[in-house]
Image (cartoon, grey):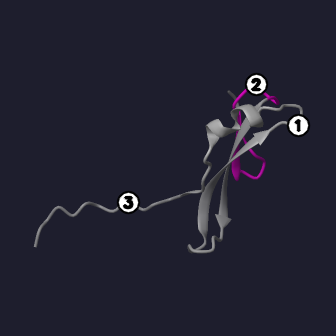
Amino acid sequence: MSAQLDYYETSLEVDLWTHSSGFRLSLLYDWIELRHKPPQYYLVPALVQFAQDDFSSKYGHLFEPLQYYELVESKKADNTRP
């Protein structure tokens, strides 16, 4: 499994098969404006298939659902009682 950071350093491309064959996982970190949320940076996963391959119909369901991932600030647990 090989991976490379793209030229603009905004996405990570991971070959899930052999190089230039099969599936490639693309992890894009980008500023996105969603309808019901404030605009912010999200990690957006995508599954890419090379043109010469036909694996989506057989194996594409194994990667679903792909969703946006957002950074969630962790809050310290307040274990004190009033």
Identity of the amino acid at label 2? Answer: Thr
Give the magenta part as a residue range: 3-21
Side of 13 relative to 21 (left or right): left
Q: Which residue is the site of mark 1? A: 51
The quarter of the image holding the C terminus is: bottom left
The percent coordinates of residue 20 (x first, y second) are 82, 30
The answer to whether residue 8 is above or below residue 32 is above
Q: Nearer the viewer, residue 49 or 57?
A: 57
Q: Which residue is the site of mark 3? A: 74
For the point 76% across and 37% down, the residue is: 56
**N-terminal-most mark, 1 or 2:** 2
The circle drawn on residue 18 is 2
For the point 38% across and 59% down, the residue is: 74
Identity of the amino acid at label 3? Answer: Ser
Local packing at callout 1 (Cα closer than 10 Å; few below 14, some 14-19, many 20+) is: few
Q: Nearer the viewer, residue 64 or 2?
A: 64
